[in-house]
Amino acid sequence: MKTVRTILAILILMMVPFAISAGGQTDSAGGDTPITFWTFNELHQQFYEMAAEEWNKDNPTRKIELQAETFPYNDMHNKLLVALQSGVGAPAIVDIEISKFPNFLKGQIQLEPMNEYVNPVVDQLVKSRLDIYAKDGNYYGLPFHVGAAVMYYNVEIMDAAGVNIDDIKTWDDYVQAGLKVKAATGKMMTSIETTDQWTFWPMISQRDSDFFNPDGSVALDNKANIATLEFLHNMIYKQKIAATTPGGNHHSEEYYGAMNAGDFASVLMPMWYMGRFTDYMSDLKGKIAIRPLPSWTVGGKRSAGMGGTGTVVTKQAEYPEIAKEFLAYAKLSEKGNIQLWSFLGFDPPRWSVWDDPALKATNKFTEYFVNDDIFGLLLEVKDEINPVTITEQIPQASELVKGDIMFQALGDQSKTPAQALKDAADKLRK
């Protein structure tokens, strides 16, 4: 009998490695478990490095070694696509930007579903932000934020012009305020992107429009979008209260320098842009106030859910289970969501932490911005945020907006707003 038990024990021990191999290895055998991570944003890298340190404090017997790298935006997405298609070279965890995400949901998806971690807390999350990174009932990407679009005002310039920013309720009010700013200070009210979409997209979302209709058909050249692009064109060339953004977009070094020097009185960007102010525009500390967007009509929507990055675990992860557990720890837990705010200044997607006292605590964002209650803004506008329509054509539409429409209509004016939108929409319809 003893011999039989011994043989069974040996057989069980022999089967363990095969069981682990079949389901993917859990942790590294001995030492810290290495987890590779790619991103296109150095602030995201810093967040995950901080999260890894916190994980190791909370899990002293299951420590990880995060091997993080930041690449240029296009280089990283192209490199990731090739790696996933070829089956070699992909990291365990990677950030995928919203406009690129549909490229990674085509064919046989090479990403790990995160349902086992999402489903237990899905009713505590802003589900529309999860749905962006989902397909056929599986959640693949975890969001960083709600991405509520807001207006950042330089109160030093606004005060010099005698403008009370709380009196700006509608976009017509905003234009009138811009005329006062220009007359009193010579400064431009704002800058408008010609190589990116963060000025245009939130403004059409406020009008219940989008690049695509809910049924997936092309909406890019509808009346609301044409009227919005014409409104932006008028601010630059008719009212002359706005200028095209130095460097083409609000993430360029040229723009950071111009805004930091006080060349513009305001800028429309999502709340996730707060970290760009603190990290790249230090001279504006104590001068920037955040307010909801002006609405198109009295009582209209004052924000839009914009941008985003879905962080995923790839099927090439050497230790997929601990990689998924770590990702959920960083992006789904209450602790992780509070850190999304305190570390990055992001409006976290888990609404159950929105009234946590930690969100009112002093940090570099509360010290930088003039607002008494920055996070109260999200509570104020959270029901005025439309979802964005994500289709497999979003990457193409996004590239057309960034590469053709904005520059043709607002940059070199080679086309009218209506022509630029129609030509791009026709390309999508082919």
Image (cartoon, helix red, strand yellow):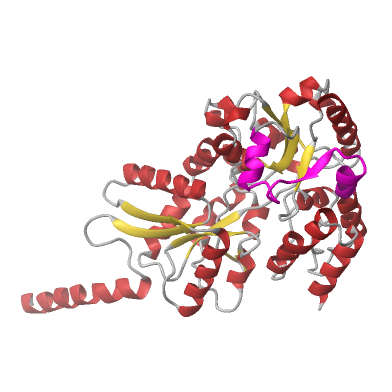
Q: Front-most of 136 and 278?
A: 278
Range covered by the magenta-colored residues: 231-260
Name the image quarter holding residue 98: bottom right
The residue at the point 47 percent across, 40 percent down is 335
The x, y position of residue 190, in whole percent, is 78, 38
Quadrant of the image containing the N terminus: bottom left
The residue at the point 89 percent across, 33 percent down is 173
Q: Front-most of 244 and 361?
A: 244
| Vertical order, 248 against 86 (above or below) | above
Q: Residue furthest left?
A: 2
Residue 183 seen in the current view: yes
Q: Front-most of 174 and 166?
A: 174
Residue 332 seen in the current view: no
The x, y position of residue 191, in whole percent, is 76, 42
Quadrant of the image containing the C terminus: bottom right
The x, y position of residue 394, in whole percent, is 71, 66
The residue at the point 15 percent across, 73 percent down is 9
Per the image, is 170 magenta?
Answer: no
The residue at the point 74 percent across, 61 percent down is 389
| Vertical order, 349 against 214 (above or below) | above
The x, y position of residue 272, in whole percent, is 62, 43
Per the image, is 259 magenta?
Answer: yes
Q: Front-most of 359 and 102?
A: 102
Q: Please indicate whether residue 371 sits to the left or right of residue 17 in the image.
A: right
